[in-house]
Amino acid sequence: MPVQKQTVLIDADITAYQVCSAAEIEWDWGDDIWSLVTDFKEVKRTFKEALDKIMETTEADDAILCYTSPKNFRQDILPTYKGTRKSVRKPMNLAALRDWTKDHYEVAMLPRLEGDDCLGILAGLRPNSFIYSADKDMKTLPVRLWSQDDRLAYHNNEVIADWYWMSQTLSGDTTDGYKGCPGIGPKRAADILGEPGQFELPEMWERVVTAYRKAKLTEDDAVVQAQVARILRHTDYNLDTGEITLWNPATL
């Protein structure tokens, strides 16, 4: 029986950002005039080396680079989502590098979705694939994951993935602009949800709603936080139409 090829789904937003940031050089033009400069040839070379290293480390046969679309459906649910990032300067050559990779690699960028969503959707549709990322949000997906930081491969089942997702729903993510439930951080969230894998999603959701009500909030408030915290899975998205199915507790 032939061995099936393994595809690595790469969080290219992170890799490209790291490469472009590292390539910036402060340049003194004299007379107290400074600027940042980059050598795009060096950027492309470094990016290629980074991908080659990923392929070697993970022993994958091929790769798909996943990028974030300019528009984000989560901002329709919660306008503050990633609102603080608009004022943060992006490194030079970031857009140029993304455009260059489209001509040289297989790239996925789906309308209104983040790169994280592309990773989650494709991982569910491709049984012989796994995700390569340093993003902690990847733990909310029931996928095979190679952690860029830990250099470890592990496989989340759906119950474990849902635990991390509900933990994010409770504790929020100030970097991404959603607050979760007031007064609850990761440790308190773990106390509420029990051990990962101890309870399935319906029980965990009841515990989440109880916590929100204790904070004088409603189940609708909890739903908003859960919807923005959820990285899309292949069951949440129609590749043919681009239709997004937002999670709803009525489906439990």
Image (spheres, grey):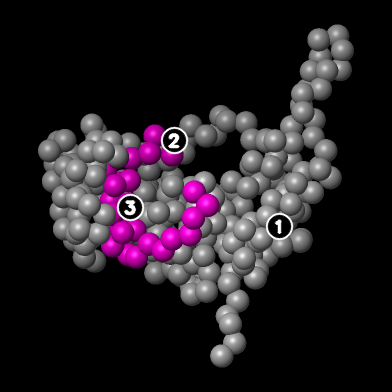
Residue annotated with mark 1: 52
Which three-letter amino acid code belongs to the residue tagged 3? Answer: Trp
Which three-letter amino acid code belongs to the residue tagged 1? Answer: Asp
Residue interval drawn in magenta: 150-176
Q: Whole-percent x and y of residue 80?
A: 41, 37
**Quarter of the image holding residue 36?**
top right
Q: Earlier in the sequence, mark 1 or mark 2?
A: 1
Residue lying at 37% horizontally and 49% vertically, measured from the top left: 228
Q: Earlier in the sequence, mark 2 or mark 3?
A: 3
Residue annotated with mark 2: 175
Q: Do the residues labelled 1 and 3 touch (CB within 8 Å)?
A: no
Residue situated furthest right in the rendering? 30
Look at the picture and state if 140 lies above or below 169.
below
Residue annotated with mark 3: 165
Look at the picture and state if 48 lies above or below 22.
below
Residue 160 drawn in magenta:
yes
Q: In which quarter of the image is the N terminus?
A: bottom right
User: Gap between marks 1 and 2, in whole Å?
Assistant: 30 Å
Q: Tell me the element at label 3.
A: helix
